[in-house]
Image (cartoon, rainbow, N blue to C red):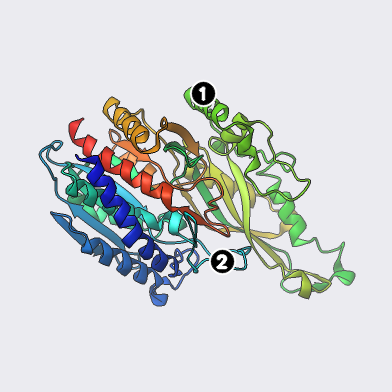
Amino acid sequence: MDLSLSNKRIERLWADEIVPQLHRYIEIPALSPSFDAAWDQSGHIADAVTLIRTWIESQPVEGMTVTVEHLPGRTPLVVTEIEPFGPAGPAVGSTTVLYGHLDKQPEMEGWRPDLGPWKPVMEGTRLYGRGGADDGYAAFASLAAVAALHAAGGSHGRLLVLIEASEESGSPDLPAHIDALGDRLGDVDLVICLDSGCATYDTMWLTTSLRGMVGGRLSVDIVTEGLHSGGYGGVVPSSFRIMRQLLDRIEDASDGRILLESANVDTPGHRIDEARSTADLLGEAMLENPPLVEGARLAVDDVTEALLAKTWRPSLSYVGADGIPPSAVAGNVLRPSTTLKLSLRIPPTADPAAVEAELVETLTADPPYGARVAVSGAGGAPGWNAPDLAPWLRSALDEACRTHFGQDLQLYGEGGTIPFMGMLGDKFPAAQFVITGVLGPGSNDHGPNEFIDVAYAEKLTRALTQVLDASTRR
């Protein structure tokens, strides 16, 4: 493959087509179903599907078929099948899957006055707006890599590009789509996912593990209507106080340690060694990334411990609340109910079904004061621990990284969740995985002022082209 030709093609595609397309994509409030129950009626996911499908179909890629798969009551799946290309190719029947998603997280507060979730703004190499980095760019980068490979005389085997629309909700619709694809999925021996992150923007980072997740809404009801706190405070227990007692069953408030046995696992020794190596490379700068308020400090002050805490240990976040009025309009009332939305990240090898069962049982057993306690909307998604890289793949990644970044490839674990990786890992245990992405320092995925570093994403696309070509010479 002529790298100079592929690089020029990718540079042109990013500048002339992908960046303008990402502007249009960011403008679409394609909230994931968990955050837009009426997603089918609002039409935003459909708009994102149309945008991505139309652009993919416009690419001059030989042997390509694009379809949008629909199942009753589920979000659509954009499926792009590409026949083997070039003089070399792996065994007939093997498939490389390239994965991404088009649904988005909610708006969140705290955006700069000149920015907004649905307002694309380019500053230098950064394109601000919700979803560009997480991970609307993936569909465009994947097809750009293939188009550049074709133009430069490279080779690839059978490719299947899957762009789903429920990932930010835990991918509840994806298993049904995978089952429906059946034989079209083929024998998957390589998975490429661009929905992960990078610890720095100067080299390529390969994700070696992902945490799983268990979530749900914990509700406490104690009376049927609000009561004057002067008349009943001290007699009727506060629903919030009951909530605190329940939370103490699952989390140590002093240090954040999760008390559920099923949510704690032994960290593999090679992952601890990996965290130490990454800590040596990143240094104390990694601990300076969170935008702490003045005088605040982190829960850990050691870089290695921080890396392990966010990759191989469980953590609980309280991401939403109901029954609590804004303070500006809160009266002196003993509220009848409190609901918290819980998000429990679990280690890569923890069983989400076991954690969910223990979580629900621990929270609902023997409720304080006989209050009505319920966990609703509970569900889990598996984590993922990467298999060892095959020699051909490690060699290809090393070469691509040095060629396009001028640095060595780096490996590290991520604290987020991509349920599809666990699904495919179980279905195809011999498959190899390339999990990477553009969510680097400051990119703030899911939060305000999210951005994609376009220059980094372009380099990653170039590296992807080289890995696809190398996959035919394994």
287 or 421: nearer the viewer: 287
At label 2, counting other C-alpha atoms closer than 10 Å, the crowd grade (few under 14, some 14-19, many 20 or more) is some
Seen from the viewer's position, the closer of residues 206 and 124 is 124
Q: Residue at x 45, y 36 (%)?
A: 209
Is 151 situated left or right of 105 in this image? left
- Residue drawn 38% across the image and 74% down it: 43
Q: Quadrant of residue 468?
A: top left
Write down the quadrant of residue 28 in the picture.
bottom left
Q: Quadrant of the C terminus?
A: top left
Badge 1 is on which residue? 273
Mark found first going from the N terminus, 2 or 1:
2
Q: Position of residue 374 (x, y in %)?
A: 61, 58
Q: Look at mark 2 in the image and give the residue it sits on.
A: 115
The label nearer to you, 2 versus 1, is 2
Q: Is residue 117 left or right of residue 328?
A: left
Per the image, label 1 sits on a secondary structure element best described as helix
Residue at position x 73%, y 43% from top? Answer: 253
How many residues crowd around disc 1 within 10 Å: few (fewer than 14), some, or many (20 or more)?
few
61 lies above or below 276 = below
**Alpha-carbon distance for marks 2 and 1?**
40 Å
From this viewpoint, is residue 259 visible?
Answer: no
Query: For the view shown, which residue lies furthest in the left direction?
Result: 87
Circle 2: element type: loop
**Percent from the top left, x then y, of residue 38?**
44, 73
